[in-house]
Structure formats: C-alpha cells, structure tokens
Image (tube, grey):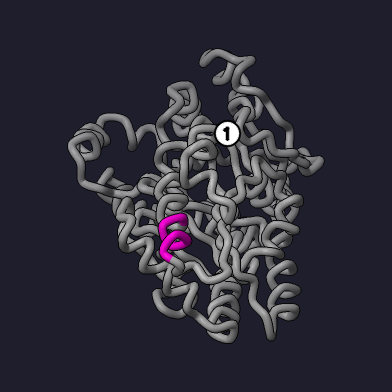
Amino acid sequence: MSMKDEGGAWPAVLVLYTELAPYVLACLNAFVEAADIELHLVRWPVHKEAPFDLVFHPRITVHERSTMDDEQLVDLALRIMPHMVIASGWVDKGYLKVCRAMRKRGAVTVMSFDTAWRGDAKQWANMLLAPTWLPRTYSHAWVTGEAQANYAHRLGLAADRVHTGFYSADTSLFVPLGERLLAERANTWPRRFLCVARYIPTKGHQLLCDAFAELCHAGEAGDWELWLAGTGELHQEVMASPSGQHPRIKHLGFKQVKEMNDVVAQSGVFVLPSTYEPWGVVVHEHACAGLPLLLSSAVGAAERFLVEGENGHRFIAGDKQTLKNMLRMFILSSDAELHAMGRQSAELGRAWSPAEWARTANELLHARP
C-alpha cells in the first residue's frame, strides 16, 4: 500500500537496532521492497566475533550509533520524522528517548525483544515499573514468540498491541538449500551432528563435546561425527579440552552465511545445546535447510520449529545424560527416519519468512499509535 505524502515522498521508518545480523537485514530489505518506504537504520558496532558481510537495500540509510550521543540521536529522529519507530527493547536509553519524542508526535513506536517471561525478581520489578515509562514510550511490541508475548502483556500492553514473529531466517538462502539436500539424500543421510553458535558460556559447547566424546569412547556413536562452527571467548578453551580434541570432533571457526552451505550439505542433524537461548534464529535456518533438530529445553525457537518426535528431539538444558540419550536416538535412526524428520523441519521452516515479517511490519506501519 502506498503512503506517499503530499510532496510525493515515501514515508520514513526509523529502526533503532543493536548488533545487526544478516537475517535482520533480510527482513528490513523485504520490508522496504514490499512497502515502498524510506528506512533509516541506526545500529551498534559490528560484533568482532561475528563480522558478517551485509548488503543493504538502496532505500536503507545506515547511521552508526557510536557517532551520536543521545541528543544527536533525537535530533536525527526529528529531522526524519518517521511514521514508525522500531527499537530494540529498553537496553539503549537513547533509543528510549527517541521513542518518547516520536510517540508525542503521533508515530507508531514498536518495542522489539526476545526475552521470555521467566518470573524472576528482575522481571517482576520491570513489570511493576513499566507503567511509569512504557505507555509514553511504546505503542506496540513485536516479540519473537508466545513466552515473550506473555512478558509484553505483563508489562501492560494489550493483546491487540503485541505481535509475534519478530525474527526470521533469510529463507531465500536456506529453503533452496534444503530442497536440494532433501532430494540428494533420498537414500543416504550424512552421519554428522552440526552445532552453529558463538563459543560463550550459555551455548553449551563443552557439554556437547563431552557428551559426544563419551558416546564415542563407549562405542555408541556409530560412524557419526560432530562439527562446530563459530568463534568466541571459549573457543580455544573448548578446542583444547580433552573432549574438544577428540578426532571425531571438528571445530570450523567463524563462517560467513554463504560459506555455511558446504558445511550444512555435509551435516545430518542440527544441535543447539544452550543453557540460555530466548529464541535462536539459527534453528529456523537449519530447519529450512532440512535438518532434523536436537535442541535444549532452553531454546525458545522450538516453539515454532520443533515438533517433538516428528522433526527432532529436546533434552534438559545443561543435563549431559539426557543430551547423550537424545544423541543416541539420532545415531540409532535409519536413513529413512532421518529423511522424514528433515522433510518435516523444512516444512516448518518455510512457514515463516522475511516476506511474512514485512507484512507484519506493514500492519504496524498502518496501526493506530
């Protein structure tokens, strides 16, 4: 729908983001293309452990947060006068100032976040404080899943002002890959577990290496291998650990998105053993690629992309024994069973995309502030 103003200009949207990733940009590019808008993006510096190559739509103007203080950021918003502002939660106080200023001027202001309601003391405190700041800052929330929507409701937003599905994989990269791999694997399925995550304490790399190595030592791993892609503060430590050095465990380091095609093409099951993972877009990516899933109970994206027993399994986060049990289930599965799980993963993955994301964004653009 066209929203050109009287001067013939496209409406402006301001996105205030933290660390930008390719999947976020895929959604923003789809929104610009579908809605005929001018989009201004303020972003935090690129994370040194994930230096992704990014390609922006011509109608996206990028502004670096590191070059502006809060006052300059508000001045930028006043110059743009956006119809809608989408901001990353409440982590950046300058972003909150912009949203308050724009809400006063009638803009739709959207709070995005992936934090699930856990009911801890901090969240109860946030819930009690929300009436003092949220109504004058945000008109809507756009969150990842139902547990996050529960949190948004508890903060005081009505059901019709909360949308889910804020994250989407770049399905244009992963769906064709999945279609190709499923066709190629009709008779033989790769015997390789794949974990893609930054090497940080909450991702569970050491637990996964320990569990898999123990299965190998016990003669229960068949001809399976474990590959891990990523880097981070624990990379060297995990690699140097006794299990991390096992000859059937391979550490691949950081890979650009397009480099991952060859890795995924050699992999049979995606594993994410996190002890804390509010969502996990990487789950969506590998579901689209047609891989069965093994996820910890802490992974939020299981809500949308995992049906227990149909396209994978879950294990108790942080529990090595249940992880070993689920790894063993995959190891004992036949090629036909793994292929059927992969097909189900691909079907679940295709159900959400940047195009769907853009439709939700356009609904918010036309919403009542």
Say which quarter of the image contains residue 309: bottom left
Residue in view at x 56 percent, y 62 percent = 193
Q: Which residue is mark 1?
A: 19
Q: Which x, y percent locates residue 20?
A: 61, 37
Front residue (pair 147, 155): 147
Q: Amino acid at mark 1?
A: Glu
Q: Magenta part of the protein: which range? A: 213-218
* Magenta span contains residue 214: yes
Q: Nearer the viewer, residue 1 or 225?
A: 225
Q: Residue furthest right?
A: 58
Residue at x-position 42% and y-position 74%? 329
User: Residue 212 at x, y = what percent?
Assistant: 46, 58
Vertical position of residue 29 compared to residue 16: above or below? below
Helix, strand or loop status at disc 1:
loop
Percent x, y of residue 253: 64, 41
Q: Is residue 261 left or right of residue 241?
A: right
Q: Is residue 196 magenta?
A: no
Q: Is residue 361 visible?
A: no
Q: Quadrant of residue 171?
A: bottom right
Tell whether 368 sits left or right of 125: right
Say which residue appears at 65% left-offset and 61% top-offset.
355
Image position of 90 (left or right of 261): left
